[in-house]
Amino acid sequence: MHAPDGFLNAGTAVATGAISAGAVGLALRQAHRELKDKQIPLAGIAAAFVFAAQMFNFPVAAGTTGHLLGGALAAVLLGPHMGALVVAIVVVVQAFIFADGGITALGYNVLNMAVIPAYGGYALFSWFRRILPASSGGVVAATGLAAWVSVLLSAMGFSIEWLFGATAPVSFTDVFTAMTAVHLLIGIGEGLISGTTVGAVLASRPDLVFGARDLDRARLADRTPARSRVFVIAGLVTALFVAGIISQFAVDAPDGLQRIAEETGFTSSEGQDRLRDGSIFADYATVGIENEAVSLAIAGVAGTLIVAAVGWGLFLAVRPPRRDDDAVAA
Amino acid sequence: MGAGHAHALYVHEHSIVHRLPAEVKLAAVFVFVVAVAITPREAIWAFAVYAGILLVALKTARLRLSFVALRLIAILPFVAFAALIPFIASGETTELLGIRMSVDGLWASWNILAKATLGASASILLTATTEVPDILEGMAALRVPIVLTSIAGFMIRYLEIIVEELGRMRTAMTARGYRPRWLWQLRPIATAAGAAFVRSYERGERIHGAMLARGYTGVMPRVAGRRASAWVWLVAGLVLLPVVAVAVTALVAT
Amino acid sequence: MSRLALDIIDLHFTYPDGRKALDGVTLSVRPGERLALLGPNGAGKTTLALHVNGLLRADRGAIRLGEMELSDDNLLEIRRRVGLVFQDPDDQLFMPTVGEDVAFGPANLGLEGDELARRVDDALSAVDASELAARVPHHLSGGERRRASLATVLAMRPDLLVFDEPAAGLDPAGRRELIETLKTLEITQLVITHDLPLALELCPRSLIMDRGRIVTDGTTAEVLADSELLAKHRLEMPFGFGSRASGP
């Protein structure tokens, strides 16, 4: 997923670059506030760990292997700010020092691989923790589910960037469908590894798991594993729910959106010309009215979901934790 | 993303490019990739010029093209996607070698291929001629916050140690007959990863102690520091002038 | 480099998890002396080392370096004067190159430019590691890393050196180089070690520490000759050493 230079257009590169820079700046400030003089060595070592973990193959099926993304895992272990910061640094260094990923692609690479999975993943983690038991087993399951869906968010993020900045006439819907389908599967591995890794850390040094800091010793000791079947089913339900909302919207939207499209001139031939380089629907990403409407619908919902997740993650991370809660605090 | 990152790409040679101050190389590569990225794909001549300049730079740096080609494998997945585009893309089609392909798609393929290759090659040139500590220093000289370059430095410093640790765990598991092929068999790997995280964190705390023991109060001290002279910047600017000129011309003319 | 005395008076320390690691430790290192601190694993030796430069703070008791008593106000100055050489050199070599690592300490003390460069050169040549300045720590051998980590500490011009298992992980030649280097350093030294022959060769005086307390204080030769005492604290002279050890 380390996109090379020129994969998306310049406008997208700059816009995502600004967003990523802002997010990383925020993460840096917050992490510094929390860790002070410990920030540099701990972030450095954590980054080294994430980088190393990303390098290792884990089995997927019949000998094929996959790799960890690690954003959600980092957020659960270190907190959303440190998580985002650490993975962002990994991605940047990979581009500059290991020549992996385009330097001009850093805007969207950092956004997709660090910002969205860490902040969004943390928000998902918090949501899942509310419905799961407050125990080690619950934390493990929440991590696994959050990691799975965070990969999905990441794929959706990329698809939306494609909508705005595609350099090839492959429709947004095609890209979106392909990306989400593939990452739905890839995410399973990410979820299982993330969950199990957090479980291992909880067993020896629970104080090192940011996402479990509200649990006392008794609750930590409760390591009833959320059974894998439950995990898979819960994950599938969530993913289907997500896909369902989007397709539902897409099915219902065209009429209303078509009217809007006609009114604002998307449908007329001048509208078509207006769609050339510069408009937000670069004419490569959408073809024909129905596709535009569907694209708009899908992008709108997916975009909302991503912004909601990342925003919620930021909100949770920035407000002070409540110690009196039974369920998860911030 | 893929295995095998930890091996730094530095190639030890004695060339002008190697001797250039890192901040100059960083800035030059940045200007180059930006120029490549914004150049309209129809301006094929521009890409030819870029490729020419890059080849000259690679030769001056005494790097073998086979070396660069090998390192370009990282962009393979995107090259594969690019190759697929003419067949799956929409729009007006044409016939090439008896197969229907989208015209737009062919242009798009070319666009991705050209920019990805040039961009990646420029990055490879940078990393092959500049040692990691110098790259970090160069970034600091270009006003990247010291906190970020320091964290990156620590990351690189301890990366191989952690990789080796994970490798040793893996070897130990393999020695006990562990040969995972399916997803549900990954538990031991993840457990090992968790143990590695704990050990890494504890090392991080010891390092913090070592830093405090040598007077660290929260701000990284300036420990090195030759700066590139104005002459070097001037020469670099002159060398990059054609690149910028080409990009601007291509933008305007297309 | 001046030589200061170290006085540790009735130090008590309990870890957050409840483990009492120091149970009334009292010891003195005389100016310019080389003192060995022996003892089994878990005796509290490393914990004690971390107290000497204020990385850990005791629950009770005092630490005095020369005339200066360790307190919250003078931590920086204490850390300038106490050089702690960690057990794992990789924990102390955290900068991209050895030269930058050696410069880290003095730079924190305010040195810069030529003065800083000179300090780095001096420290590296003191341990015979001048050629390592531009090297990346990860590519060094165990012995080179050990010398480099020592240089990072020497660059602070400390008045007291505390070594935590200096010879651990070194091959015999590396160990020999280290011992010879330590002999040349004219600074007060506290050497924590399991390596009894090293203690015998370097340190005229030895203490045994066990379960958070000092249990023996005497000349190294005497201490090591008492095999019953050694056995009581899980120590033993290596095979081939006679029951009567003799000093350097």
Image (cartoon, helix red, strand yellow):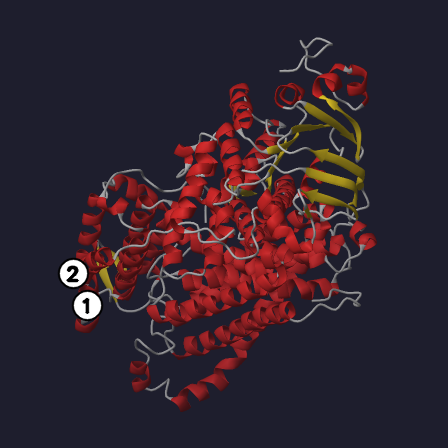
Q: Earlier in the sequence, mark 2 or mark 1?
A: 2
Q: Are marks 2 and 1 in contact (CB under 8 Å)?
A: yes
C-alpha distance separating marks 2 and 1:
9 Å
Q: Nearer the viewer, residue C20 or C202?
A: C202
Reading the image, the residue beneath label 1 is B250
Left or right of residue C155: residue A79:
right
Relative vertical location of residue C101 with respect to residue A313 in this rendering, above or below: above
Q: Chain of mark 2?
A: B
As helix, strand or loop, the secondary structure at mark 2 comes to helix
Res A88 seen here: yes
Reading the image, the residue beneath label 2 is B45
Relative vertical location of residue C206 with respect to residue B133 in this rendering, above or below: above
Q: Chain of mark 1?
A: B
Q: Quadrant of the C terminus of chain A?
A: bottom right
Left or right of residue B45: residue A162:
right
Location of residue A16 (image quadrant)? bottom left
Res A121 seen here: no
Relative vertical location of residue C209 with respect to residue A31 in this rendering, above or below: above
Can you give x and y, in whole percent of width and height, for residue A197 in the image?
Answer: 64, 47
Can you give x and y, in whole percent of width and height, for residue C61 in the image?
Answer: 79, 45
Please name the amino acid that badge 1 sits on: Ala
Please name the amino acid that badge 2 sits on: Trp
Can you give x and y, in whole percent of width and height, for residue A15 in the image?
Answer: 41, 71
Question: How many marks can you see?
Answer: 2
